[in-house]
Amino acid sequence: MIQWKNLDSEQQLESIIEDSHNAPQIIFKHSTTCPISGMAKRRLEGNWSSEINPYYLDLLAYRSVSNAIETQLAVTHQSPQVIILHKGKAIYDESHLDISSSELENSLQQI
């Protein structure tokens, strides 16, 4: 079961990027008004087996954080979107219906 950690500031994003040097970090960007985003979130929650607790970014409330992700990690904004950070860089990102727990797991195993 996913234990979401809220991502709500650019300062926290800096910490997550720094923490990714010690262990992979996952960010899920979610629009609370988008049905596709809701479906992607439910799919992750229903099939989650990773020991990593991902960060949850509410795009409507914290769009500036999403902008910082795009700028600092060179990941084009999508919604919904999942990103894996490792050693300070985005090494994986998927959006919309391509978001999959099994693909995330496969990517994490390759680290």
Image: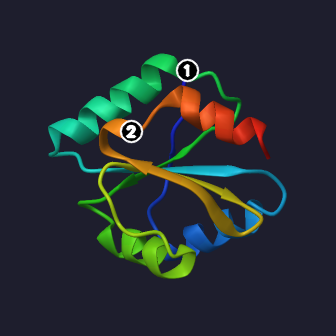
Instruction: Check disc 1 and give the amino acid type.
Output: Met
Is residue 24 or residue 10 the one in the foreground?
A: 24
Relative height, residue 21 to residue 97 (above, below): below
Label 1 secondary element: loop
Q: Earlier in the sequence, mark 1 or mark 2?
A: 1
Does residue 16 appear anywhere in the picture? yes
Residue 73 x, y percent position in the rendering = 56, 74
Q: Which residue is mark 1?
A: 1
Instruction: Check disc 2 and give the amino acid type.
Output: Asp
Q: Quadrant of residue 38?
A: top left
Residue 46 x, y percent position in the rendering = 44, 18
Does residue 2 appear anywhere in the picture? no
- Could you tell me if the residues under marks 1 and 2 are in contact, i.e. CB atoms within 8 Å? no
Point out the residue furthest to the right here: 22
Viewed as shown, does residue 54 lie left or right of 56? right
x 76%, y 36%: residue: 109
Q: Quadrant of residue 88?
A: bottom right
Q: Which residue is mark 2?
A: 98
Residue 42 x, y percent position in the rendering = 35, 26
Tag nearer the camera, 1 or 2? 2
x 27%, y 30%: residue: 39
Label 2 secondary element: helix
Relative height, residue 6 to residue 14 (above, below): above
Residues packed near mark 2 inside 10 Å, few (<14), some (14 to 19) or many (20 plus): few
Residues packed near mark 1 inside 10 Å, few (<14), some (14 to 19) or many (20 plus): few
Mark 1–mark 2 distance (CA, rounded to whole Å): 20 Å
Q: Quadrant of residue 97?
A: top left
Is residue 46 or residue 75 the one in the foreground?
A: 75
The colour scheme used to paint the residues is: rainbow
Relative height, residue 104 to residue 71 (above, below): above
